[in-house]
Every structure is written in C-alpha cells, then in structure tokens.
Amino acid sequence: MDEINKKIEYLRYLRDIGETEIPLSSSAEIGKTNAPNSTEGNIEMNEPNEEKKPTGSDLESVDRKRKILGEIVGEVSRCTKCQLHKSRTNPVSGAGNPSADIMFIGEAPGAEEDKQGIPFVGRAGKLLDKILAACELTRDDIYITNILKCRPPKNRDPLPAERTACMPYLLAQIDTIKPKVICCLGRIAAQSILQTKIPLGKLRGQVHRFRGTSLIVTYHPAAILRNENFKRPTWEDFKFLLKIVKEQKAKG
Ligand code: URA
Ligand code: SF4
C-alpha cells in the first residue's frame, strides 16, 4: 500500500469507528522494527527521519530467524500429526517480518487461506489490514500466524487434540521471532494459549505473560464482521497494544 492509500485507510477506519479526533502523535514508529522486512530484495528504505538503520548484527539475526521460520514452514508442510493434514489444500505456517515487534495469533486458516497458503487473506484478513493501516502498520511490520496451521473442515472450532498437536510449531515461531508483544485475535487463540476457559471479554484490557512475553487479547476480525459493535472496543485494544509495544521497546 502506498503512503497516500495508507493515510486514506487510516482516516476511513477512524471515521468508521466514530473517532472524532485525529491522534496528534503518530503511532507509526511504535510497532515497527528496524530490521529489514521479509520481502526478498526489498531491504526497507527508511524514510529520511531519525529511524535507526539495521546494524550488521541485526541483519545476521534476521537472516537466522528467517532460516528457522523457513524450516518450520518445511516441517508444517510435511506434518501429519493430526487428521487435518488429510483435508488441507495448503498448510498455512505464518507470514510477515521475522523480527516483528508484534506477533498476531489467530485461530486457523479459512477457505481462502487454505487455497493460498497465506494467513488472513480472506474477508477477516482484509479488515485486519485496515486496522493495521489505522495503526500505520503493514503486514511487513508484523508477523501473523494461527493456532492451527491446517484448515478444519467447514471452519469448525479446532479440537483439543489438534491444538495440542500443532502447538509446538507456534511455540517455535514465538521463540524464534521473540516479539515484544503477542496479540491473540479472538477467543480460541487466547484460550488455547493461556490455557483457560475465561471468556474473551474478561481477558481483554490486561497484559498477560506467555513464555516471558507480554500478551494481550482482542476480538477476532471475523467477529467484527458479524457484529459492528466490536469495532470500537477493538480499536481501544489496538491503542492499548501500541502502548504496550512502546513500553516494551523503551525497556529494550
Ligand atoms: N481466521 C483466522 O483465524 N486465521 C486466518 O488465517 C484466517 C481467518
Ligand atoms: Fe500438523 Fe498442525 Fe496441520 Fe495438524 S494442523 S497436520 S498438527 S500442521
């Protein structure tokens, strides 16, 4: 998305959620990492501002992370640990910046994701892109994956055995990327990771810890598509997310 379109998306999203003020201090730098993004040959050209250029060791570390994430893609594509491997078209390992500050975790691939092998490319994903744009973030700034790497038939909820079987891939992704903050999208992701039955509404608005990382919870974008009333609280959660990322980055 070019700069103008990004700004338009941002203003549209603010209008849609009934925001009447434009935040003065840009959130643009908050979730961004200084490491190059995941697009081959597209070592990000920083805008002429004070943003730090990646150092040699950042490059080394991003290359190492990319390599491990690539190995996870390979393992997932050969995985037969649960029954879902039989019905999948493509496994969906994850996508984004190997050195992302923010890692989003959804539930499982849907029809479009299963077709393309990429997470969040259907309607829910398009909405997520808009929310990210409102935060002045793109897919290249974040990493995104799911609890399950293969699509459950008819998008049914992941079974406990499937979640358990697939969890090592997610843990390996978290330990590799080492994000500043994890954001669970929806009840299934939050409850699977935090190993709880506490309802989503009660898990929102607080900072949880998972494997030494701060973790917050918000609505799944598909839930917003079903119920517009979730738009505003989701926006509050994203502002909270950006605040936590900023705090974590300040801590170093
Ligand atoms: N919903 C999810 O939880 N994950 C996707 O990748 C797509 C839709
Ligand atoms: Fe393996 Fe996970 Fe796919 Fe099941 S859902 S086959 S555990 S990759």
Image (spheres, helix red, strand yellow):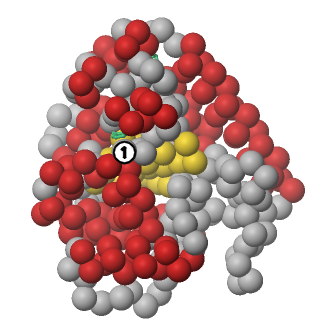
Camera sees residue 208: no
Vertical side of 205 occupied by 25: above or below: below
Q: Position of residue 149 (x, y in %)?
A: 44, 27
Q: Please tell me how crowded label 1 is: few (under 14), some (14-19), or many (20+) other residues with Cα within 10 Å.
A: some
Q: How many marks?
A: 1
The picture quadrant for ligand 2 comes to top left
Give the side of residue 234 with respect to residue 211, left or right: left
Which residue is at a point 36% across and 9% down the rendered structure image? 83
In the rendered view, tell whether residue 40 sits above or below residue 161. below
Q: Residue at x 21, y 69 (%)?
A: 232
- Residue found at x 23% / y 41%: 187
Front one among 32 and 226: 226
Picture residue at 49% right of the left edge, 75% below the top: 5
- For the N terminus, which image quadrant? bottom right
Along the line of sight, which residue is nearer the eye, 101 or 153? 153
122 horizontally vs 97: left or right: left
The x and y percentages for residue 186 are 26, 45
Judge: label 1 CB < 8 Å from ligand 1: yes
Please state if 147 lies on the left or on the right of 139 as rendered.
left
Q: Position of residue 107 (x, y in %)?
A: 33, 36
Q: Quadrant of residue 81?
A: top left
The image quadrant of residue 175 is top right
Instruction: Report helix, strand or loop for mark 1.
Output: loop
- Please name whichever residue, 39 or 123, is drawn nearer the observer in this view of the structure: 123
| Residue linked to disc 1 | 122
The residue under label 1 is which amino acid type?
Answer: Gly
Above-or-below relation of 92 to 162? below
Residue 5 visible to the viewer: yes
Q: Quadrant of the C terminus?
A: bottom right
Residue 80 locus on image (x, y percent): 48, 8
